[in-house]
């Protein structure tokens, strides 16, 4: 017999993803410092960094990256946190990801292509594109 996921574990994971979405940096960092993976992903492959980036929380992104989170971890659709930050027009998040070594050429769609599609040369410049 195969058991489903432990209800308490699912509840904790849901709380962690909500902390990332809401930019609760100190609380989320405390969980990661206590042993939660900085690369934890939900059922769609969205990592904690992806959720924090998409919702515009640069401090949370930086805290997760400092704790070993992968800046280019794509979700199940191949989207990266960097492309998500470009899509949501979050320059501070873009800067944090680029400073941590995020690759503008990773994932699909590419972050640079997203900036160009939305006619945002300022964001493309943050990505190192001319």
Image (spheres, grey):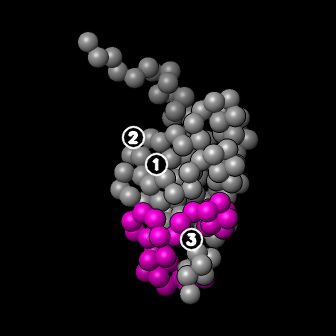
Q: Which mark is residue 46?
A: 1
Observer able to see residue 47: yes
Residue at 69% over, 40% down: 29
Q: Residues within 10 Å of mark 1 (few under 14, many from 20)?
A: many
Residue 25, by quadrant, is: top right
Numbered range of the magenta stretch? 94-123
Residue 28, image x and y in percent? 66, 39
x, y percent for residue 60: 67, 50
Whether residue 87 can be seen here: no
Residue 16 at x, y percent in the picture: 57, 37
In space, the residues marked 1 and 2 are separated at their CA atoms by: 7 Å
Residue beneath disc 3: 89
Q: Secondary structure at mark 1?
A: loop
Q: Earlier in the sequence, mark 1 or mark 3?
A: 1
Disc number lying in front (1 or 3): 1
Which residue in the protein does label 2 denote?
A: 43
Q: Position of residue 21 (x, y in %)?
A: 57, 48
């Amino acid at each position: 017999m195969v058991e489903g996921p432990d209800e308490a574990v699912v509840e904790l994971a849901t709380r962690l993803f909500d902390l990332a979405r809401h930019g609760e940096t100190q609380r989320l960092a405390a969980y990661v410092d206590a042993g939660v993976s900085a690369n934890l992903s939900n059922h769609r492959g969205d990592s904690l960094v992806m959720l924090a980036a998409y919702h515009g929380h640069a401090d949370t992104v930086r805290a997760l990256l400092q704790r070993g989170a992968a800046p280019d971890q794509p979700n199940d659709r191949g989207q990266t946190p960097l492309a998500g930050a470009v899509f949501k027009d979050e320059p501070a998040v873009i800067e944090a990801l680029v400073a941590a070594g995020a690759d503008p050429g990773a994932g699909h769609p590419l972050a640079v292509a997203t900036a160009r599609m939305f006619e945002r040369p300022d964001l493309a410049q943050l990505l190192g594109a001319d």
